[in-house]
Image (tube, grey):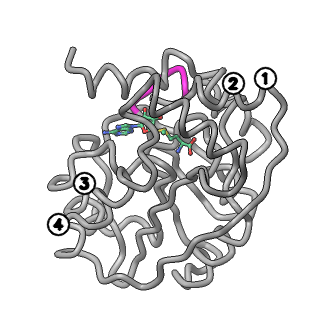
Amino acid sequence: MTPKKELRDSFDIFSKEYDEARLEYPEELVDDALKISGIPKDGKILDVGCGPGKATIQFGRRGYDILGLDIGSKLIGVARQKSADFRNIDYKVGVFETTYLPLKEFDLIISAQSWHWLNPYLSNRKANRILNDGGYLALFWNFEAFESSEFMSNLKKLFKQYCPDFPKDYGDANKATEHPTLKKYFKPVKEKIYSRDFDFNTEGIGGLIDSYS
Ligand SMILES: C[S@@+](CC[C@H](N)C(=O)[O-])C[C@H]1O[C@@H](n2cnc3c(N)ncnc32)[C@H](O)[C@@H]1O
């Protein structure tokens, strides 16, 4: 197994821990994505790399039909359990680049913390093909603001000392959003940072760090 594949698969192995540790996304982001895309009430959304369904459920709560797709069968199991009360939310296990999805099927594709895991040449082209004319792709990530407090900057120093590859800051997201094939198929509409404060106890911050790939 290549190191990148090994890291990618670690989300599935620790599916429950991942779900407990990771944060939801700002509701304002959900509002913006829905508003900018102009998706009709009966429109369809695809969540690529949905993991345990965090963003899927946030968009599903707004009443839209949404399909979550992920390579991790355990992750999809967790997502299905959490979504049992929603008839408008469905899931599928599969690799986005190779899973059959009908052309022009979706009005909005979202990908939370996942687009950098995909093959950019295949995934940007495919996203373009399965979106309706005028459809939108919304890519988003949660990142720690390591300069926001003394605690966070001390945490960054520890990362640098013991785990020099971390923190990646915005590197992964930038790699995905600046890829030429993304620009080939999609015109940028809006880029926005949503700032939030969180109180973590020792267990919470430890779980979050453990969930990093
Ligand atoms: C960092 S996790 C994000 C999960 C979820 N979207 C969230 O916000 O918590 C990245 C997810 O992308 C999935 N993934 C990676 N490559 C994929 C691919 N080629 N097709 C589908 N899912 C993929 C992984 O299994 C993992 O669940």
- Secondary structure, mark 1, is helix
Position of 52 compared to 171: left or right? right
| Residue 203 tag number | 1
Q: Label 4: how many residues lie within 10 Å, few (<14), some (14-19) or many (20+)?
A: some
Of labels 1 and 4, earlier in sequence is: 4
Camera-nearest label, 4 or 3: 4
Mark 1 vs mark 4, foreground winner is: 1
Q: How busy is the neighbourhood of tag 1: few (under 14 within 10 Å), some, or many (20 plus)?
A: few
Q: Amino acid at mark 4?
A: Thr
Q: Amino acid at mark 2?
A: Gly
Provide the secondary structure element on which disc 3 rests.
helix
Distance Cα–Cα, label 1 vs label 2: 5 Å
User: Does the residue at mark 1 contact the one at mark 2 (Cβ under 8 Å)?
Assistant: yes
Disc 4 target residue: 181
Whether residue 145 is situated above or below residue 51 in the rendered picture: below
The residue stretch that appears in magenta: 71-76
Residue identifier under label 2: 206
Residue 171, position as x, y percentages in the image: 36, 53
Q: Nearer the viewer, residue 209 or 177?
A: 209
